[in-house]
Image (tube, rainbow, N blue to C red):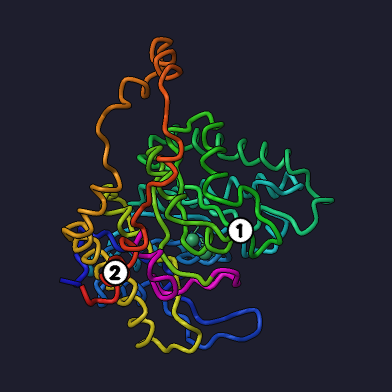
Amino acid sequence: MYTPQAENKFTFGLWTVGNIGRDPFGEPTRKQLSPVEIVHLLAEVGAWGVNFHDNDLVPITATAAEQDKIVKDFRQALDDTGIVVPMATTNLFSDPAFKDGAFTSNDSKVRAYALQKTMNAIDLGVSLGATTYVFWGGREGTETDAGKDPVTAIKRSREAMNYLCEYVRDQGYDLKFALEAKPNEPRGDIYNATTGNMLAFIETLDHSEMVGVNPEVAHEHMAGLNFTHHVAQAMEQNKLFHIDLNDQAFGRYDQDFRFAAVNLKSAFFIVKLLEDNGYDGCKHFDAHAYRTSDYEDVKAFARGCMRNYLILKEKVQRWNADSEIQGLLAYINEDDGSMDGYMGQYSSDKAAALRAQTFDRAALGERGQPYEALDQLTIEILLGVR
Ligand code: GCO
Ligand code: MN
Ligand code: MN
């Protein structure tokens, strides 16, 4: 029941299970696995797909001949294991060239290089099967607003997205873009800090229909926000093109923990939102194992992400089928239809009728809502006693 299936579309990045445990204070604690080894590891734990940044697969220093060999070996590993590549992305943050951003850099040569690097990375991703392309602007921000004009930064971001959308159209690729927000880290502040900012920005693009979002649990939690609400807004606008699942304690640095490792109840409501609304895109676990893990424990980490999702999915089914919960929901959402003539699509007759209606305000304020009871039933389902 908790065994991952292809239909779950569980994916991991090469950089996730391949994380070597380096942090700002310490050296790597695990040896680097090759992309081929990572594909085999993912197959062993039961994942469906693998995603990558251009330079996770092909080092930035590789020659054309080296690239060909690496891609050939990687393709062979995909064929041998049945692992697919649904998403790819560009590393526009590691190289010192991008220290002040890529598309928002003040240096036009850096901006041009970022576009060139992204076009090459799109070609690579598409050649391996990717149909979603993620943009995470890790360095697109500031430590001091004295150095970059924030209005110009938005215009530069838009110009880059418009350019790359046209590139994809020009090539005739079947590829959509998913923009990923993060409030800070590695920059002091990153532009378009939340999924909500991204949704507003997307509407200003020339080909907004090609562009959606890739929200990440940790990123909204870093900002102290309700992730489920942000994902819901994206879904309601048909803009949830991809999702990065992981976990994060509020108020901490970017932790990228195993999905559901910290905030079990929020994880439940995320899974509930995705399942109840029939989200059928990738569920990408953008997380990594603790620095203390060896590769056996990295497998436990990866299995844990998928297993937690499936356990929570089963809890969602249990919640939806619970007659006491359904009874409470029916009471909460009770509606005798007597207000229908006053609301919905506006008309001047309706507005006049509504104005003439008298309401018993005190009675409205007296009606209680059994949310304590409902939440306790939710907790009992999560704790496994129901
Ligand atoms: C992070 C980000 C990244 C992106 C990845 C894909 O906080 O480091 O979440 O992991 O998701 O670069 O664009
Ligand atoms: Mn992250
Ligand atoms: Mn991410």
Farthest right residue in view: 146
**Which residue is labeled 1 in the image?**
138
The x, y position of residue 100, in whole percent, is: 73, 56
- Identify the secondary structure beneath mark 1: loop
Location of residue 236 by image quarter: top left
Label 1 near ligand 1 (CB < 8 Å):
yes
Q: Which mark is residue 369?
A: none
Q: Can the viewer see residue 178?
A: yes
Residue situated in front as seen by the camera: 172 or 90: 90
The span from disc 2 to disc 1 (Cα, nearest Å) is 30 Å
Residue situated in front as seen by the camera: 348 or 254: 348
State the residue at coordinates (21%, 54%): 326
The x, y position of residue 122, in whole percent, is: 46, 48
Predominant SS of the magenta segment? loop
Label 2 near ligand 1 (CB < 8 Å):
no
> In the drawing, does residue 112 fall left or right of residue 338?
right
Q: Which of the two marks, 2 or 1, is nearer to us in this view?
A: 1
> In the drawing, does residue 349 fall left or right of residue 207?
left
| Type of the residue with mark 2 | Ala
State the residue at coordinates (68%, 61%): 187
Q: Quadrant of the N terminus?
A: bottom left
Reply yes or no: does residue 287 show up in magenta. Answer: no
State the residue at coordinates (20%, 61%): 6
Q: Quadrant of the C terminus?
A: bottom left
Query: Which span is picked out in magenta?
Result: 250-269
**Which residue is labeled 2 in the image?**
77
| Type of the residue with mark 1 | Gly
Q: Is residue 248 above or below residue 172?
A: below
Number of residues whose C-alpha sits closer than 10 Å to that of mark 1, classed few (under 14), some (14–19) or many (20 or more): many
Q: Can the viewer see residue 17?
A: no
State the residue at coordinates (38%, 82%): 298
